[in-house]
Image (cartoon, helix red, strand yellow):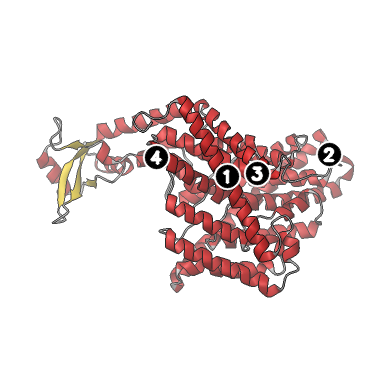
Amino acid sequence: MRTKGPSQVQFWFIALAIGIAAGTAALFFRKGIGWLQTFLYGSDDIRLASVAGELPWWWVLTVPILGGLVVGLILDRFTPDGRVRAVADVIEGAALKEGRVEQRAGLASAAASLITLGSGGSSGREGPVVHLAAVISTWVSDRIGANGITGRDLLGCAVAAAVSASFNAPIAGAIFALEVVLRHFAVHAFAPIAIASVAGTVINRLEFGGVTEFMLPEEGGLAFYVELPAFLLLGLVSGLVAAVLMRSVIFAEDIGNRVQTATGLPRYLRPMLAGAVLGAIAIPFPHIIGVGYETTAAALTGQIGLSTAIIFAIVKVIAVAVTMGGRMGGGMFSPALVVGALTGLAFGLIATGVLPDVSGAETVYALAGTGAVAAAVLGAPISTTLIVFELTGDWQTGLAVMTAVSLSTALASRLVARSFFLTQLERRGVHLAAGPQAYLAETIRLATILRPVDHARAAPEAACRDLIGQGVVLGATQTLETALRLFEKTGADFVPITKPDPETGEPVLLGAVFQTDALRSYAAALADTAAEEHS
């Protein structure tokens, strides 16, 4: 298996094993959050907001501070940059690192996110769970020497199982892995990913049964054709809300960076300060604590009034921005569900109040808003729509949800770089939103395509020395992206490649990269990617 790669049958068994492992990891992560919340607050997420609202104010304030301190110490010790790894890093691993992610930083991120969610952070569990699953697939890929295609497929299997086990959503889990992480729907990847997704769902149902995450009221409905324009408008509103949510997190991250740089604040204290702000917010608004299951359920069942829904949505956006900007950890999907449910409910209360004779229940708007905001944040309209259906078990209002989702994602994608995850990567200088043609050159090291000095058609040494003297030179560890830019700038036919002498530090000529070889390598990478995506 290490020398030739797994056969198809072997690969399916590996996919099943990864699905079981990732599903189990997701289950224990969820149970761990619930255990920690119960220990610290006296209840898990089902009734966390109600119970936290009855606790002494000093306890609600102190718990997030202590949790943030522990998170900061973990990230400072086990990550190079003090940053939690999540879905964006998994997408980057699939695109640029042959389906691999950082394992040490990934495990630390999972621990940090668990503590964040258990001690008062306002984020979601899907981000760390997805990355934790990717750590499992990375370990397997390294053990069997998986190539890029196999590594990415195994990564997709792990992600699908983690999402399925987290939300009891097997269909959405498989589609999420294809739509968001692998970013293609190749037939060869579907079967193993489906197997892993089913395995993750079985793990969930062995523990929680086959019930849906949220139970909706049966009364009410949708006055289809007359009411559809209202859902179009809700989609636009949800797209704006999603953009505000994403921009708020980005703004908070920038503010945190500036404050940290200006004050010289140790990075391990940044989550603690964020925890202090969250604790202060949670005293009057305990609904911000944790994943937000209770608030989402209350919105979907119409148990929240108009003014309360609007205020809760605004405060939740602020709390999510503080959590993420303070580098406490967690994901964005669950917060988007909370904000979406509150947005949809508020819109529905207004719409049904203005035109009561042609309106269905306001809870249908809450359901549509849930999917619309979450889909816009994730940049995943298909899998998010399916997740909403599987979370609620309500397939009758599918037309309303799809209508709102379509417009929200279309609008939000114009206001950010297609999704929150791709925006995060864009801010780090990783350009994936434009497609493979924008990032493939960064995956090819010049050492793999250079013609060494003893090559039969090597570049003349004298010409190489002359170019080096002009500053036209690159290192063997640099990428094809850099070489292509240098070719365009200088018009040279080749670029010398050097490395420093380990003893003297002087540059040693290794050979040269020719422009024709560079273009040929880039074309081959594009062809391989197209073949993988359409196989």
Residue at the (67%, 72%) spot, across then down? 59
Q: Which residue is mark 1?
A: 24
For the residue pair 220 and 295, the one nearer the viewer reads as 295
SS for callout 2: loop
**Measuring 67% from the left and 40% from the top, which residue is drawn there?**
205
**Rendered position, 295 above or below 133:** below
Q: Nearer the viewer, residue 237 or 280?
A: 280
Q: Which residue is mark 4?
A: 143
Q: Position of residue 131 (x, y in %)?
A: 51, 47
- Picture layout, residue 279 above or below residue 534: below
Foreground: disc 4 or disc 3: 4
Identify which residue is drawn at 47% across, 40% down: 434
Label 4 – label 3 distance at C-alpha: 29 Å
- Checking the image for residue 221, the label placed there is 2
Distance in Å between CA atoms under marks 1 and 2: 37 Å
Q: Is residue 359 left or right of residue 83?
A: right
Question: Which one is earlier in the sequence, the residue at label 1 or at label 3?
Answer: 1
Task: For marks 2 and 4, give the one nearer the viewer.
Answer: 4
Q: Nearer the viewer, mark 1 or mark 2?
A: 1
Q: Is residue 197 left or right of residue 507?
A: right
Q: Nearer the viewer, mark 3 or mark 2?
A: 3
Q: CA distance from mark 1 to mark 4?
A: 20 Å
**Which residue does the numbered mark 3 point to in the structure image?**
167
Residue that extends furthest to the front in the rendered view of this protein: 206
Q: Earlier in the sequence, mark 2 or mark 4?
A: 4
* Inter-mark Cα distance, 1 to 3: 13 Å
Place of residue 213 in the rendered image (x, y in percent of width and height, measured from the top left): 71, 45
